[in-house]
Image (spheres, rainbow, N blue to C red):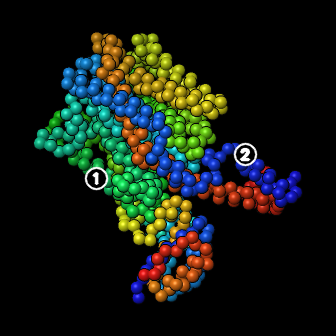
Amino acid sequence: MSKSHMLALFSDFDQASEAIRDLKSSNFEGFKLDDVTLKSPIEHPEIEELLGKRPVYVRIFTFFGALFVPLLGFLFVASSQATFLLQPKGGKPVIPLPPNFVLTYEFFILGGVYMTVLGFFISAKLPMKRNKLYNARVSEDQIGILIKAEDSIMPAIKDLFTRHNPLEIMGGDN
Amino acid sequence: MVNTYEETEVAVEKRFVPKPLDINADIAWAKINKDILRSLERPRPIFWVIFIASFALFLVGVSCEVYQYQTGMGVANLNNPQVWGLYIATFIWWIGMGHSGTLLSALLHIMHADWRKPIYRYSEAMTTFTLLTAALFVMVHLGRIWQFYYVVAYPNERWTWPNFQSPLVWDATAIGTYLTSSLLFLYIGMIPDLAICRDNAIGIRKKLYTFMSLGWMGTDRQWANFRVTYLTLACFLMPLAVSVHSIVSTDFAASQQPGYHITSFPPYFVAGAIYSGLAVIITLFIVLRYTFRFEEYMTMPILEKLAKLTFAAGMVWTYLNLIEYATTWYGNDMYAKQALIYRATGPFAPEWWMMNFLGSVLPFALTFKRVRASIPVMLFMSIFINFGMWLERWMIISPTLAHGIYPWTWDDDQWPSFVQWGIVAGSFGWFNMLFMLYCKIFPSVSMYEVKEMLHERRFFKSTNVATARDSAINPDLAVEGGLAS
């Protein structure tokens, strides 16, 4: 069986969440909540109550960035200082720890920030090609529900959406 | 005592909306897009006046730099002992100014202060451009700008590395980190708005916004990742902003020069940076509000909050300034004490006293509501406060170098030449030009965050009114909800 996409546009978030709630309780055969995507002009964290937690891997990248980049930074600074072994240091240590900690701290921030951004791109799958069913109104003031489902249940889903008075329904016809 | 349902409604409304809202909660979301996107097309004619004037100033700066480059540093009237002059003073001022942008945005974001939302975007952009402007002075003050690459850490055939024990190298690392991190913070926060621009643009602009928005579609997965990323970046940028200017202060505090070797310099520099940055945010607030017709978003209640924050930062700076004077005066370091007396009574005395007046006395005017409520007065206040903060940097650099430990090095006859003044003026032109260009190409007010602000306000208002209505009807609920009083 082939799958197709359908996008329903609603005027506000409450309407859209009601439609998702209905969709969830309808138990269409072969339909998974993971195939539902909410598109909105602002963030609606409350949708996670209906759709479940979305995977966010950013913190893992942050953790490793903040852990390993300062270590590498310290090694970089210390190894470059070590190349001066033959140079007189006037009694001072070849690898002085206090000033190196200052630099290590900056590398800690640098690593944390860079890896967080990298993690964001990977976890949010950016850059990505826009879906054909994208509607510019979802970046303005409307809420979109994008469904990916088997063709056989698309008419039933369309009926369900229609009961919730959508502004527009796009796709769903393969 | 309220009896009827209608009376309860009125009483609750009075109780929960006692002060003006930061933004009119009834603005339609489509209108927000329209208003902000309009700023990218048709600003008021003053935009072009500012832009052309800035470009002219920039050309003055470039001419002076070319003259200095061709002729030598002598034309700047920079010589021992005053080797830094206006260049490094202005460098510190620009670096400092950039602090408030990111710091304000990150701190207020972490604290969920939603009044930041209409003003944080241009503040972050200001940070980026002030850092770019500051970086110019590092090269300009070298004189031999072609040897700039020596400060960059890279392996070369002579196996020479920069001295990592020097605060100057910490400085370069910290500022480099701050510049790139601030730029990423600005860019990541802008992605949802770039998608709005993409959806409404045509031609080359559409290509630019399509490329920069990375295919953002506002899906729940993207928003969930965005929320975590933005908060994490804010958490990193807070300590970074503090560390950068305290490291800049160690350029001075780690030396033995009387007048520089002061323990309180790191917090003093950070406080001064936040103070001057807030003053610039007010100046730009007023300029953008008029130029791009942002009256509905950059509102008077927000300006008032900024004014109060500026006053608070000014008082912190004043306290640290007085602490510096007191510890120098009562300390046992005769050289440092002489340096302080020299600043207050020597040839730099008029500038020093003016700095203290503009930085510590003038902000008391901000305690008056009539001052905070007047846009022209606030514009002049913010400019004068910033002039005071620029004088502060100059008073740190020049009098101190002119009056060191050894009397045979003293020289106070090195007033900056027109070349120095020209390059300083050129830096203003460069900054204004970049900043105004940014505001013409990218949305300087965050559209999605203003929508979030209105969404939260409507939600909060309706919830509170409902809770209060319930509690007025049922006192048991009032006790539970903490509304009994």
Q: Is residue A81 left or right of residue B472?
A: left
Q: CA distance from mark 1 to mark 2?
A: 55 Å
Q: Is residue B108 left or right of residue B198?
A: right
Marked residue chain, label 2 = B
10 Å crowding of disc 2: few (<14), some (14-19), many (20+): few
**Residue found at x 24% / y 37%:** B151
Q: Is residue B8 left or right of residue B50?
A: right
Q: Is residue B248 visible?
A: no
Secondary structure, mark 1, is helix
Secondary structure, mark 2, is loop
From this view, report whether residue B89 is shown above or below residue B207: above
Q: Which residue lies under the disc numbered 2?
A: B18
* Residue B29 falls in image quadrant: bottom right
Residue closest to the far left: B157
Amino acid type, label 1: Leu
Q: Mark 1 vs mark 2: same chain? A: no
Residue B311 location, x and y as percent? 57, 32
From this view, report whether residue B256 is shown above or below residue B373: above
From this view, report whether residue B447 is shown above or below residue B310: below
Q: Which residue lies under the disc numbered 1?
A: A72
10 Å crowding of disc 1: few (<14), some (14-19), many (20+): some
Amino acid type, label 2: Pro
**Residue found at x 62% / y 41%:** B301
Of residues B132 and B380, the one drawn nearer to the viewer in this rendering: B380
Marked residue chain, label 1 = A
Residue B361 location, x and y as percent? 56, 23
